[in-house]
Amino acid sequence: MLFGIFYDKDLSKCPQYQEKNQPMLYLPNDDPDLAELVGNEENRLETTLNLIAAENHSPQSITEVMGSVFNTKTIEGYPGKRFHSGCIHVDKVENLAISRGKTLFDAEYINVQPHSGTSANLAVYFSVLNLGDKILSMSLPHGGHLSHGHHASITSKCFNFSHYKVNSETQMIDYNQVRELAHSVKPKMIVAGASSYPRLIDYEKMSRIAKEVSAFFLTDMAHLAGLVAAKLIPSPVPYSDFVTFTCYKTMMGGRGGVILCKEIFGKKVDKAVFPGCQGTSAVNLIAAKALIFKLAAEEKFISIQKKTIQNARIMARILMEKGYRVISDGTDNHQVLIDLTSKDISGKSAENCLESVGIILNRNVVPKDEKNPGKVSGIRIGSGAVSARGMGEPQMQKIIELMDMVIMNQTRMEIIKEVKDSVLKLCRAFPVNRSELEYF
Ligand code: DSN
Protein backbone atom coordinates (compact mmCIF):
# COMPACT_ATOMS: atom_id res chain seq x y z
CA MET A 1 0.00 0.00 0.00
CA LEU A 2 0.88 3.57 -0.53
CA PHE A 3 1.33 4.92 2.97
CA GLY A 4 0.21 2.05 5.07
CA ILE A 5 -1.68 3.63 7.90
CA PHE A 6 -4.99 1.92 8.35
CA TYR A 7 -7.48 2.88 10.97
CA ASP A 8 -10.03 0.30 10.03
CA LYS A 9 -9.20 -2.59 12.33
CA ASP A 10 -10.71 -5.23 10.06
CA LEU A 11 -8.69 -4.01 7.11
CA SER A 12 -5.45 -4.01 9.04
CA LYS A 13 -5.99 -7.71 9.76
CA CYS A 14 -6.09 -8.50 6.07
CA PRO A 15 -2.79 -10.22 5.15
CA GLN A 16 -2.61 -8.45 1.77
CA TYR A 17 -2.46 -5.11 3.56
CA GLN A 18 -0.09 -6.28 6.26
CA GLU A 19 2.31 -7.63 3.67
CA LYS A 20 2.25 -4.61 1.40
CA ASN A 21 2.00 -1.90 3.98
CA GLN A 22 5.06 0.26 4.27
CA PRO A 23 4.45 2.78 7.00
CA MET A 24 5.08 6.44 6.32
CA LEU A 25 8.46 7.31 7.74
CA TYR A 26 8.34 11.02 8.46
CA LEU A 27 4.85 12.43 8.23
CA PRO A 28 3.50 10.81 11.43
CA ASN A 29 6.23 12.64 13.38
CA ASP A 30 6.05 15.95 11.57
CA ASP A 31 2.29 16.13 11.47
CA PRO A 32 0.31 13.31 13.08
CA ASP A 33 -2.99 15.02 12.19
CA LEU A 34 -2.17 15.07 8.53
CA ALA A 35 -0.79 11.52 8.68
CA GLU A 36 -4.08 10.39 10.11
CA LEU A 37 -5.98 12.10 7.32
CA VAL A 38 -3.79 10.39 4.72
CA GLY A 39 -4.50 7.07 6.39
CA ASN A 40 -8.18 7.80 6.51
CA GLU A 41 -8.23 8.64 2.82
CA GLU A 42 -6.39 5.40 2.02
CA ASN A 43 -9.01 3.62 4.02
CA ARG A 44 -11.86 5.43 2.27
CA LEU A 45 -10.51 4.44 -1.12
CA GLU A 46 -10.17 0.81 -0.04
CA THR A 47 -13.61 0.56 1.51
CA THR A 48 -15.74 2.39 -1.03
CA LEU A 49 -16.61 1.86 -4.69
CA ASN A 50 -15.35 4.74 -6.79
CA LEU A 51 -17.68 5.43 -9.69
CA ILE A 52 -16.53 9.00 -10.30
CA ALA A 53 -15.89 9.19 -14.03
CA ALA A 54 -13.14 11.80 -13.55
CA GLU A 55 -11.06 9.64 -11.18
CA ASN A 56 -9.10 6.41 -11.21
CA HIS A 57 -6.62 4.40 -9.21
CA SER A 58 -3.00 4.90 -10.30
CA PRO A 59 -0.09 2.51 -10.07
CA GLN A 60 2.03 2.94 -6.95
CA SER A 61 4.99 3.94 -9.11
CA ILE A 62 3.04 7.03 -10.21
CA THR A 63 2.68 8.11 -6.59
CA GLU A 64 6.35 7.39 -5.97
CA VAL A 65 7.54 9.57 -8.81
CA MET A 66 5.08 12.35 -7.90
CA GLY A 67 6.49 12.35 -4.38
CA SER A 68 10.09 12.23 -5.56
CA VAL A 69 12.78 14.94 -5.41
CA PHE A 70 11.58 16.22 -8.78
CA ASN A 71 8.97 17.97 -6.70
CA THR A 72 11.60 20.49 -5.58
CA LYS A 73 12.99 21.66 -8.93
CA THR A 74 12.06 25.00 -10.39
CA ILE A 75 11.94 25.09 -14.17
CA GLU A 76 11.07 27.91 -16.50
CA GLY A 77 11.33 27.43 -20.22
CA TYR A 78 11.89 24.17 -22.05
CA PRO A 79 14.62 21.47 -22.14
CA GLY A 80 17.97 23.01 -23.14
CA LYS A 81 16.56 26.56 -22.77
CA ARG A 82 15.89 27.03 -19.07
CA PHE A 83 16.07 30.09 -16.87
CA HIS A 84 17.56 28.23 -13.90
CA SER A 85 20.60 25.99 -13.76
CA GLY A 86 20.68 22.44 -12.44
CA CYS A 87 18.33 21.10 -15.09
CA ILE A 88 20.54 18.26 -16.31
CA HIS A 89 18.17 15.54 -15.10
CA VAL A 90 14.87 17.33 -15.39
CA ASP A 91 15.61 18.12 -19.04
CA LYS A 92 15.93 14.38 -19.62
CA VAL A 93 12.66 13.77 -17.76
CA GLU A 94 10.78 16.29 -19.88
CA ASN A 95 12.33 14.97 -23.09
CA LEU A 96 11.31 11.46 -22.10
CA ALA A 97 7.72 12.58 -21.51
CA ILE A 98 7.78 14.42 -24.85
CA SER A 99 9.10 11.51 -26.91
CA ARG A 100 6.91 8.88 -25.22
CA GLY A 101 3.77 11.06 -25.42
CA LYS A 102 4.31 11.81 -29.12
CA THR A 103 4.78 8.13 -29.88
CA LEU A 104 1.83 6.95 -27.78
CA PHE A 105 -0.64 9.35 -29.38
CA ASP A 106 1.08 9.57 -32.77
CA ALA A 107 1.24 13.35 -32.40
CA GLU A 108 3.41 15.81 -34.30
CA TYR A 109 4.03 18.01 -31.25
CA ILE A 110 3.43 17.85 -27.52
CA ASN A 111 3.65 20.16 -24.52
CA VAL A 112 3.70 18.31 -21.18
CA GLN A 113 3.84 21.35 -18.88
CA PRO A 114 0.18 22.34 -18.27
CA HIS A 115 -0.84 22.06 -14.65
CA SER A 116 -4.34 20.91 -15.53
CA GLY A 117 -6.86 20.43 -18.30
CA THR A 118 -8.17 23.97 -17.85
CA SER A 119 -4.61 25.37 -18.08
CA ALA A 120 -4.09 23.35 -21.24
CA ASN A 121 -7.31 24.65 -22.82
CA LEU A 122 -6.52 28.26 -21.84
CA ALA A 123 -3.07 27.97 -23.38
CA VAL A 124 -4.52 26.60 -26.62
CA TYR A 125 -7.05 29.44 -26.82
CA PHE A 126 -4.32 32.03 -26.21
CA SER A 127 -1.88 30.36 -28.62
CA VAL A 128 -3.81 31.33 -31.76
CA LEU A 129 -6.70 33.57 -30.69
CA ASN A 130 -7.02 37.17 -29.57
CA LEU A 131 -9.04 38.35 -26.57
CA GLY A 132 -12.72 38.44 -27.47
CA ASP A 133 -12.49 36.03 -30.42
CA LYS A 134 -15.43 33.72 -31.00
CA ILE A 135 -15.32 30.04 -30.00
CA LEU A 136 -18.02 27.41 -30.58
CA SER A 137 -18.13 24.59 -28.02
CA MET A 138 -20.51 22.17 -26.33
CA SER A 139 -22.91 23.56 -23.73
CA LEU A 140 -22.07 22.44 -20.17
CA PRO A 141 -25.56 21.10 -19.33
CA HIS A 142 -25.32 19.04 -22.51
CA GLY A 143 -21.94 17.56 -21.62
CA GLY A 144 -19.32 20.28 -22.13
CA HIS A 145 -16.73 21.45 -19.60
CA LEU A 146 -16.37 24.62 -17.51
CA SER A 147 -13.28 25.60 -19.48
CA HIS A 148 -15.30 25.46 -22.71
CA GLY A 149 -16.71 28.89 -21.93
CA HIS A 150 -19.04 28.39 -18.98
CA HIS A 151 -20.07 31.78 -17.55
CA ALA A 152 -18.33 30.98 -14.24
CA SER A 153 -15.01 30.21 -15.96
CA ILE A 154 -12.33 32.76 -16.86
CA THR A 155 -12.46 31.31 -20.38
CA SER A 156 -15.82 33.05 -20.91
CA LYS A 157 -14.40 36.38 -19.70
CA CYS A 158 -11.60 36.20 -22.26
CA PHE A 159 -13.39 34.80 -25.30
CA ASN A 160 -16.81 35.02 -26.82
CA PHE A 161 -18.38 31.56 -26.65
CA SER A 162 -21.42 30.11 -28.38
CA HIS A 163 -22.60 26.62 -27.56
CA TYR A 164 -24.03 23.66 -29.43
CA LYS A 165 -26.30 21.16 -27.71
CA VAL A 166 -27.23 17.52 -28.04
CA ASN A 167 -30.30 16.46 -30.01
CA SER A 168 -33.30 16.34 -27.68
CA GLU A 169 -34.45 12.92 -28.97
CA THR A 170 -31.17 11.04 -29.23
CA GLN A 171 -29.14 13.01 -26.66
CA MET A 172 -26.26 12.80 -29.15
CA ILE A 173 -24.40 15.63 -30.87
CA ASP A 174 -26.42 17.01 -33.74
CA TYR A 175 -23.74 17.71 -36.35
CA ASN A 176 -26.22 19.61 -38.54
CA GLN A 177 -26.81 22.00 -35.66
CA VAL A 178 -23.05 22.34 -35.13
CA ARG A 179 -22.65 23.14 -38.85
CA GLU A 180 -25.51 25.69 -38.84
CA LEU A 181 -24.12 27.40 -35.75
CA ALA A 182 -20.60 27.38 -37.17
CA HIS A 183 -21.81 29.10 -40.36
CA SER A 184 -23.89 31.68 -38.52
CA VAL A 185 -21.48 32.43 -35.65
CA LYS A 186 -18.27 32.16 -37.72
CA PRO A 187 -16.08 31.20 -34.75
CA LYS A 188 -12.30 31.35 -34.88
CA MET A 189 -12.17 28.01 -33.05
CA ILE A 190 -14.47 25.00 -32.65
CA VAL A 191 -14.10 22.77 -29.59
CA ALA A 192 -15.08 19.10 -29.49
CA GLY A 193 -14.95 17.03 -26.33
CA ALA A 194 -16.93 16.83 -23.13
CA SER A 195 -17.04 16.04 -19.45
CA SER A 196 -20.23 14.07 -19.52
CA TYR A 197 -20.99 12.65 -22.94
CA PRO A 198 -21.12 8.86 -23.18
CA ARG A 199 -20.94 8.58 -26.96
CA LEU A 200 -18.19 8.69 -29.56
CA ILE A 201 -17.56 11.99 -31.28
CA ASP A 202 -17.14 12.12 -35.04
CA TYR A 203 -13.89 14.11 -35.08
CA GLU A 204 -13.61 13.92 -38.84
CA LYS A 205 -17.01 15.55 -39.25
CA MET A 206 -16.23 18.21 -36.64
CA SER A 207 -12.92 19.01 -38.33
CA ARG A 208 -14.67 19.32 -41.71
CA ILE A 209 -17.10 21.81 -40.21
CA ALA A 210 -14.20 23.76 -38.72
CA LYS A 211 -12.48 23.86 -42.12
CA GLU A 212 -15.66 25.07 -43.83
CA VAL A 213 -15.60 28.20 -41.64
CA SER A 214 -11.79 28.48 -41.42
CA ALA A 215 -11.81 27.83 -37.68
CA PHE A 216 -9.11 26.12 -35.67
CA PHE A 217 -10.21 22.75 -34.28
CA LEU A 218 -9.50 21.76 -30.67
CA THR A 219 -10.52 18.43 -29.13
CA ASP A 220 -10.54 18.12 -25.36
CA MET A 221 -10.22 14.37 -24.72
CA ALA A 222 -9.60 14.67 -20.95
CA HIS A 223 -12.02 11.87 -20.09
CA LEU A 224 -11.05 9.61 -22.95
CA ALA A 225 -7.24 9.73 -23.07
CA GLY A 226 -6.72 6.22 -21.63
CA LEU A 227 -9.20 4.69 -24.05
CA VAL A 228 -7.56 6.53 -26.96
CA ALA A 229 -4.04 5.56 -25.80
CA ALA A 230 -5.17 1.92 -25.76
CA LYS A 231 -6.55 2.41 -29.29
CA LEU A 232 -9.99 1.21 -28.29
CA ILE A 233 -11.88 4.27 -29.53
CA PRO A 234 -11.03 6.61 -32.41
CA SER A 235 -8.30 9.16 -31.81
CA PRO A 236 -8.98 12.86 -32.44
CA VAL A 237 -5.27 13.47 -33.14
CA PRO A 238 -5.32 13.05 -36.94
CA TYR A 239 -8.25 15.45 -37.32
CA SER A 240 -7.53 18.13 -34.73
CA ASP A 241 -5.21 21.13 -34.78
CA PHE A 242 -4.97 20.77 -31.00
CA VAL A 243 -5.85 18.00 -28.54
CA THR A 244 -5.82 18.51 -24.79
CA PHE A 245 -6.17 15.98 -21.99
CA THR A 246 -5.55 15.26 -18.33
CA CYS A 247 -3.70 12.26 -16.97
CA TYR A 248 -5.77 11.25 -13.94
CA LYS A 249 -9.03 10.00 -15.42
CA THR A 250 -9.02 6.96 -17.73
CA MET A 251 -5.30 7.68 -18.24
CA MET A 252 -4.53 6.51 -14.66
CA GLY A 253 -1.42 8.67 -14.36
CA GLY A 254 -1.76 11.34 -11.70
CA ARG A 255 -2.50 15.02 -12.03
CA GLY A 256 -1.68 17.45 -14.81
CA GLY A 257 -2.59 18.38 -18.38
CA VAL A 258 -1.06 17.83 -21.82
CA ILE A 259 -1.39 19.53 -25.20
CA LEU A 260 -0.87 17.70 -28.49
CA CYS A 261 -0.84 19.74 -31.67
CA LYS A 262 0.25 19.97 -35.26
CA GLU A 263 3.92 20.90 -35.61
CA ILE A 264 3.08 24.33 -37.07
CA PHE A 265 1.42 25.37 -33.80
CA GLY A 266 4.15 23.98 -31.54
CA LYS A 267 6.07 27.19 -30.89
CA LYS A 268 2.89 29.20 -30.29
CA VAL A 269 1.62 26.57 -27.84
CA ASP A 270 4.91 26.51 -25.96
CA LYS A 271 4.86 30.30 -25.60
CA ALA A 272 1.22 30.30 -24.52
CA VAL A 273 1.92 27.72 -21.78
CA PHE A 274 5.14 29.35 -20.56
CA PRO A 275 5.40 32.27 -20.04
CA GLY A 276 1.85 32.96 -21.27
CA CYS A 277 -0.38 31.11 -18.82
CA GLN A 278 2.02 29.51 -16.32
CA GLY A 279 5.28 30.05 -14.53
CA THR A 280 7.34 27.08 -13.49
CA SER A 281 5.80 23.72 -14.27
CA ALA A 282 5.77 20.72 -11.89
CA VAL A 283 8.60 18.35 -12.79
CA ASN A 284 7.21 15.61 -10.54
CA LEU A 285 4.01 15.65 -12.59
CA ILE A 286 5.95 15.74 -15.86
CA ALA A 287 7.82 12.65 -14.63
CA ALA A 288 4.50 10.94 -13.83
CA LYS A 289 3.35 11.78 -17.36
CA ALA A 290 6.51 10.17 -18.77
CA LEU A 291 5.81 7.08 -16.69
CA ILE A 292 2.15 6.65 -17.63
CA PHE A 293 3.01 7.17 -21.32
CA LYS A 294 5.34 4.15 -20.98
CA LEU A 295 2.88 1.99 -19.03
CA ALA A 296 0.01 2.87 -21.33
CA ALA A 297 1.69 1.03 -24.20
CA GLU A 298 1.69 -2.21 -22.18
CA GLU A 299 -0.83 -5.01 -22.50
CA LYS A 300 -1.90 -4.70 -18.87
CA PHE A 301 -2.99 -1.07 -19.28
CA ILE A 302 -4.81 -1.95 -22.48
CA SER A 303 -6.70 -4.77 -20.79
CA ILE A 304 -7.90 -2.44 -18.01
CA GLN A 305 -9.13 0.01 -20.64
CA LYS A 306 -10.96 -2.81 -22.45
CA LYS A 307 -12.60 -3.82 -19.21
CA THR A 308 -13.49 -0.18 -18.53
CA ILE A 309 -15.52 0.02 -21.74
CA GLN A 310 -17.11 -3.42 -21.22
CA ASN A 311 -18.05 -2.62 -17.64
CA ALA A 312 -19.67 0.69 -18.59
CA ARG A 313 -21.74 -1.06 -21.26
CA ILE A 314 -22.80 -3.74 -18.78
CA MET A 315 -23.87 -1.15 -16.21
CA ALA A 316 -25.82 0.81 -18.84
CA ARG A 317 -27.62 -2.33 -19.99
CA ILE A 318 -28.58 -3.45 -16.50
CA LEU A 319 -29.75 0.01 -15.55
CA MET A 320 -32.02 0.13 -18.59
CA GLU A 321 -33.32 -3.38 -17.81
CA LYS A 322 -34.22 -2.05 -14.37
CA GLY A 323 -36.19 0.81 -15.91
CA TYR A 324 -33.66 3.63 -15.53
CA ARG A 325 -33.44 6.29 -18.19
CA VAL A 326 -29.89 6.12 -19.48
CA ILE A 327 -28.96 9.20 -21.49
CA SER A 328 -28.52 8.28 -25.18
CA ASP A 329 -29.61 4.69 -24.35
CA GLY A 330 -26.13 3.44 -23.68
CA THR A 331 -22.45 4.26 -23.81
CA ASP A 332 -19.39 3.93 -26.02
CA ASN A 333 -16.88 4.94 -23.36
CA HIS A 334 -16.40 4.77 -19.58
CA GLN A 335 -19.38 6.93 -18.66
CA VAL A 336 -23.03 6.22 -18.03
CA LEU A 337 -25.40 9.15 -17.45
CA ILE A 338 -28.64 8.47 -15.70
CA ASP A 339 -31.68 10.75 -15.67
CA LEU A 340 -33.47 10.15 -12.36
CA THR A 341 -36.47 12.36 -13.13
CA SER A 342 -38.87 9.40 -13.03
CA LYS A 343 -37.39 7.99 -9.79
CA ASP A 344 -38.58 10.58 -7.32
CA ILE A 345 -35.07 11.48 -6.21
CA SER A 346 -32.80 14.35 -7.24
CA GLY A 347 -29.24 13.76 -8.39
CA LYS A 348 -28.03 15.46 -5.22
CA SER A 349 -30.06 13.20 -2.90
CA ALA A 350 -29.02 10.10 -4.84
CA GLU A 351 -25.36 11.15 -4.54
CA ASN A 352 -25.75 11.63 -0.78
CA CYS A 353 -27.64 8.38 -0.13
CA LEU A 354 -25.18 6.40 -2.22
CA GLU A 355 -22.20 7.98 -0.49
CA SER A 356 -23.67 6.90 2.85
CA VAL A 357 -23.36 3.26 1.75
CA GLY A 358 -19.91 3.67 0.19
CA ILE A 359 -20.87 4.12 -3.46
CA ILE A 360 -19.12 7.28 -4.60
CA LEU A 361 -20.35 9.08 -7.70
CA ASN A 362 -21.44 12.57 -8.67
CA ARG A 363 -24.71 14.26 -9.42
CA ASN A 364 -24.85 15.53 -12.95
CA VAL A 365 -26.94 17.92 -14.90
CA VAL A 366 -28.73 16.17 -17.77
CA PRO A 367 -29.92 17.70 -21.05
CA LYS A 368 -33.05 19.82 -20.51
CA ASP A 369 -32.65 19.52 -16.74
CA GLU A 370 -35.50 21.20 -14.91
CA LYS A 371 -34.17 20.97 -11.35
CA ASN A 372 -32.17 23.83 -9.88
CA PRO A 373 -28.38 23.67 -10.45
CA GLY A 374 -27.67 22.55 -6.87
CA LYS A 375 -29.94 19.54 -7.06
CA VAL A 376 -29.96 18.49 -10.72
CA SER A 377 -31.78 15.48 -12.11
CA GLY A 378 -29.02 13.08 -12.98
CA ILE A 379 -26.04 11.12 -11.81
CA ARG A 380 -22.88 10.17 -13.72
CA ILE A 381 -21.11 6.84 -13.35
CA GLY A 382 -17.59 6.03 -14.51
CA SER A 383 -16.24 2.50 -14.79
CA GLY A 384 -12.51 3.32 -14.68
CA ALA A 385 -11.65 2.83 -11.00
CA VAL A 386 -13.72 -0.32 -10.44
CA SER A 387 -12.16 -1.82 -13.58
CA ALA A 388 -8.69 -0.95 -12.28
CA ARG A 389 -9.55 -2.96 -9.16
CA GLY A 390 -10.14 -5.97 -11.42
CA MET A 391 -13.92 -6.03 -11.23
CA GLY A 392 -15.94 -7.47 -14.12
CA GLU A 393 -19.49 -8.37 -15.16
CA PRO A 394 -20.70 -10.07 -11.92
CA GLN A 395 -19.48 -7.13 -9.86
CA MET A 396 -21.10 -4.59 -12.24
CA GLN A 397 -24.39 -6.46 -11.84
CA LYS A 398 -24.00 -6.36 -8.09
CA ILE A 399 -23.12 -2.66 -8.04
CA ILE A 400 -26.20 -1.69 -10.05
CA GLU A 401 -28.36 -3.94 -7.89
CA LEU A 402 -27.01 -2.20 -4.77
CA MET A 403 -27.49 1.26 -6.26
CA ASP A 404 -31.04 0.40 -7.18
CA MET A 405 -31.75 -0.88 -3.67
CA VAL A 406 -30.60 2.45 -2.23
CA ILE A 407 -32.43 4.64 -4.74
CA MET A 408 -35.69 2.71 -4.31
CA ASN A 409 -35.47 2.41 -0.50
CA GLN A 410 -33.90 5.66 0.67
CA THR A 411 -35.57 5.63 4.09
CA ARG A 412 -35.48 1.90 4.91
CA MET A 413 -32.56 1.67 7.29
CA GLU A 414 -32.39 -2.13 7.27
CA ILE A 415 -31.88 -2.09 3.49
CA ILE A 416 -29.34 0.71 3.68
CA LYS A 417 -27.39 -1.32 6.26
CA GLU A 418 -27.54 -4.43 4.08
CA VAL A 419 -26.18 -2.49 1.10
CA LYS A 420 -23.41 -0.97 3.20
CA ASP A 421 -22.25 -4.45 4.25
CA SER A 422 -22.36 -5.71 0.66
CA VAL A 423 -20.29 -2.75 -0.57
CA LEU A 424 -17.63 -3.44 2.04
CA LYS A 425 -17.55 -7.12 1.14
CA LEU A 426 -17.09 -6.29 -2.52
CA CYS A 427 -14.31 -3.81 -1.75
CA ARG A 428 -12.43 -6.34 0.35
CA ALA A 429 -12.66 -8.94 -2.40
CA PHE A 430 -11.11 -6.44 -4.86
CA PRO A 431 -8.52 -4.40 -2.95
CA VAL A 432 -7.06 -1.30 -4.55
CA ASN A 433 -3.74 -2.70 -3.48
CA ARG A 434 -1.76 -0.18 -5.46
CA SER A 435 1.73 -1.37 -4.65
CA GLU A 436 0.89 -4.68 -6.23
CA LEU A 437 -1.23 -3.42 -9.08
CA GLU A 438 -0.71 -6.75 -10.69
CA TYR A 439 -1.96 -5.30 -13.95
CA PHE A 440 1.12 -3.04 -14.12
N1 DSN B 1 -14.05 17.79 -15.57
C1 DSN B 1 -14.42 17.40 -14.24
C2 DSN B 1 -15.27 16.17 -14.28
O1 DSN B 1 -15.48 15.61 -15.34
O2 DSN B 1 -15.76 15.75 -13.23
C3 DSN B 1 -13.21 17.18 -13.39
O3 DSN B 1 -12.09 16.73 -14.05
Image: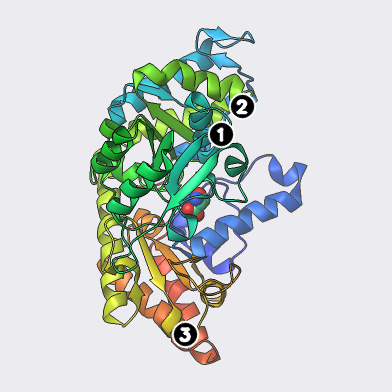
Residue 372 in percent (x, y) is at 59, 72
- Residue found at x 28% / y 61%: 331
The quarter holding residue 104 reads: top left
Q: Relative to 401, does residue 200 appear above or below in the rendering?
A: above
Q: Relative to 117, does residue 429 appear above or below in the rendering?
A: below
Q: Which numbered circle lies on residue 380?
A: none
The quarter holding residue 72 reads: top right
The quarter holding residue 170 reads: bottom left
Q: Amino acid at mark 1?
A: His
Describe the element under mark 1 as helix, strand or loop. Answer: loop
Would you call the spot at circle 2 few (<14 residues within 10 Å), some (14-19), or many (20 or more)? Answer: some
Question: What is the spatial separation of the Cα atoms under label 1 and label 2, in whole angstroms?
Answer: 8 Å
Task: Please name the residue that numbered disc 3 is placed on.
Answer: 418
Describe the element under mark 3 as helix, strand or loop. Answer: helix
**In this rendering, which labeled residue sits more in front, label 1 or label 2?**
2
Nearer-the-camera pick, 76 or 17 = 76
Task: Please name the residue that numbered disc 1 is placed on.
Answer: 115
Nearer-the-camera pick, 227 or 216 = 216
Task: Please name the residue that numbered disc 2 is placed on.
Answer: 278
**In this rendering, which labeled residue sits more in front, label 2 or label 3?**
2
Assess whether mark 2 and mark 1 are in contact (beta carbons under 8 angstroms). Answer: yes
Describe the element under mark 2 as helix, strand or loop. Answer: loop
- Residue found at x 32% / y 21%: 108
Q: Amino acid at mark 2?
A: Gln
Of pointers 1 and 2, the one earlier in the residue sequence:
1
Question: What is the spatial separation of the Cα atoms under label 3 and label 1, in whole angstroms?
Answer: 42 Å
Residue 392 in percent (x, y) is at 28, 63
Q: Amino acid at mark 3?
A: Glu
